[in-house]
Image (cartoon, rainbow, N blue to C red):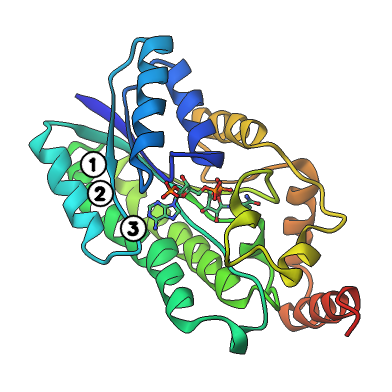
């Protein structure tokens, strides 16, 4: 049975993406840690849209999680024809003060598990010459971002990995899309790694989209077979002009601005 796998689907942007695809009558496999939220969402989507909805509760900071998810899809007889790597989290603060274990866990979640899931499901898509992969990066993937240094690094990785993979997948007729939201009103800035003074500085004066707006843009970009899309017209403008400015200049400007906002 053809199924769309969405990671990080228990809330925020991932949940809104699930609603978008459910409304188009796609069957869904939802992945996140919070089992009760996943179960409730599956029930709601099934009742509302009469699609097959399943979930797997998994912690993608664990290196073995991706292979376990893949094995489970085989056991359940699911053909994952669209993989949406959305699960991720951030961290804010001075790098030297951030908890190292937590930063490395974030790299496992935002990067290594994304790569591992892609590796698991891509083979079958290539064999069938049919399938789609959508990797969720961030507006921050276009800028060096002091005081979010590791998070920005993980999203730069997603961007560069996805551009390269998209090219490798062209001969197999697969569409690989990089999708980059800007600041979005989800739980993202409320996690313990982001909910601090440095995190608040990031959100000051920033235009915010809702997860529903972001997911609607993702659906539209998916249907138009875009290879990259940045959510929000203002975000698109800034990300596009960022390519014209030397990265070290951007880093210096952002760093100075954030220190000023912090009163340092
Ligand atoms: N919100 C923003 O401003 C923003 C901006 C740019 C990019 N993004 C990106 O958009 C994506 C979605 O973020 P969001 O804004 O929707 O954040 P969110 O509301 O915090 O949702 C994050 C999702 O990821 C799941 N998740 C977190 N840690 C996980 C883990 N260890 N294993 C499995 N699942 C995990 C969460 O579910 P559980 O807690 O149930 O595991 C949740 O479903 C992320 O990749 C983020 O980097 C967000």
Residue 196 lies, in percent from the top left, at 70, 68
What's the residue at 60%, 89% (across, down)?
96
Quadrant of the rendered image containing residue 97: bottom right
Label 1 neighbour load within 10 Å: few <14, some 14-19, many 20+: many
What's the residue at 28%, 54% (across, down)?
117
Image marks 2 and 3: residues in contact by CB distance under 8 Å: no
Q: Is residue 208 visible?
A: yes
Residue 100 lies, in percent from the top left, at 47, 83
Q: Is residue 61 left or right of residue 246?
A: left
Q: Nearer the viewer, residue 188 or 221?
A: 188
Q: Is residue 174 visible?
A: no
What's the residue at 58%, 58% (across, down)?
191
Q: Which residue is mark 3?
A: 60
SS at badge 3: loop
Q: Is residue 144 left or right of residue 23?
A: right
Image marks 1 and 2: residues in contact by CB distance under 8 Å: yes
- Disc on res. 122: 2
Q: Does the numbered disc 2 mark a residue whose Cβ is under 8 Å from ligand 1?
A: no
Q: Earlier in the sequence, mark 2 or mark 3?
A: 3
Image marks 1 and 3: residues in contact by CB distance under 8 Å: no
Q: Nearer the viewer, residue 111 or 196?
A: 196
Q: Is residue 146 above or below residue 228?
A: below
Residue 262 lies, in percent from the top left, at 86, 76
Q: Is residue 194 left or right of residue 104?
A: right
Q: CA distance from mark 1 to mark 3?
A: 22 Å
Q: CA distance from mark 2 to mark 3?
A: 18 Å
Q: Nearer the viewer, residue 14 or 2?
A: 14
Farthest residue toward the left?
75
Q: Which residue is mark 1?
A: 125
Q: CA distance from mark 1 to mark 2?
A: 5 Å
SS at badge 2: helix
Q: Does the numbered disc 3 mark a residue whose Cβ is under 8 Å from ligand 1?
A: yes
């Amino acid at each position: 049975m053809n199924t769309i796998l969405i990671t990080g689907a228990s809330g925020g942007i991932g949940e809104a993406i699930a609603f978008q695809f459910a409304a188009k009558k796609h069957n869904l496999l939802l992945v996140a840690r919070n089992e009760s939220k996943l179960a409730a969402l599956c029930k709601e989507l099934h009742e509302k849209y009469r699609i097959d909805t399943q979930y797997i509760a998994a912690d993608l900071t664990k290196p073995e999680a991706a292979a376990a998810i893949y094995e489970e899809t085989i056991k359940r007889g699911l053909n994952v024809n669209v993989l949406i790597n959305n699960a991720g989290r951030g961290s804010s603060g001075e790098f030297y003060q951030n908890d190292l274990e937590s930063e490395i866990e974030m790299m496992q979640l935002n990067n290594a598990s994304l790569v591992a899931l892609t590796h698991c499901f891509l083979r079958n898509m290539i064999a069938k010459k049919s399938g789609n992969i959508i990797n969720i990066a961030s507006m921050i993937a276009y800028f060096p971002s002091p005081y979010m240094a590791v998070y920005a690094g993980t999203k730069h990785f997603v961007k560069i990995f996805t551009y390269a993979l998209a090219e490798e997948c062209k001969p197999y007729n697969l569409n690989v899309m990089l999708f980059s939201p800007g600041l979005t009103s989800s739980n993202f800035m409320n996690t313990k790694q982001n909910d601090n003074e440095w995190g608040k500085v990031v959100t000051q004066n920033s235009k915010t989209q809702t997860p529903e707006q972001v997911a609607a843009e993702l659906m539209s970009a998916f249907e138009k077979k875009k290879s990259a899309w940045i959510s929000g017209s203002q975000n698109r403008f800034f990300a596009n002009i960022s390519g014209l400015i030397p990265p070290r200049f951007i880093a210096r400007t952002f760093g100075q601005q954030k220190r000023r906002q912090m009163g340092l």
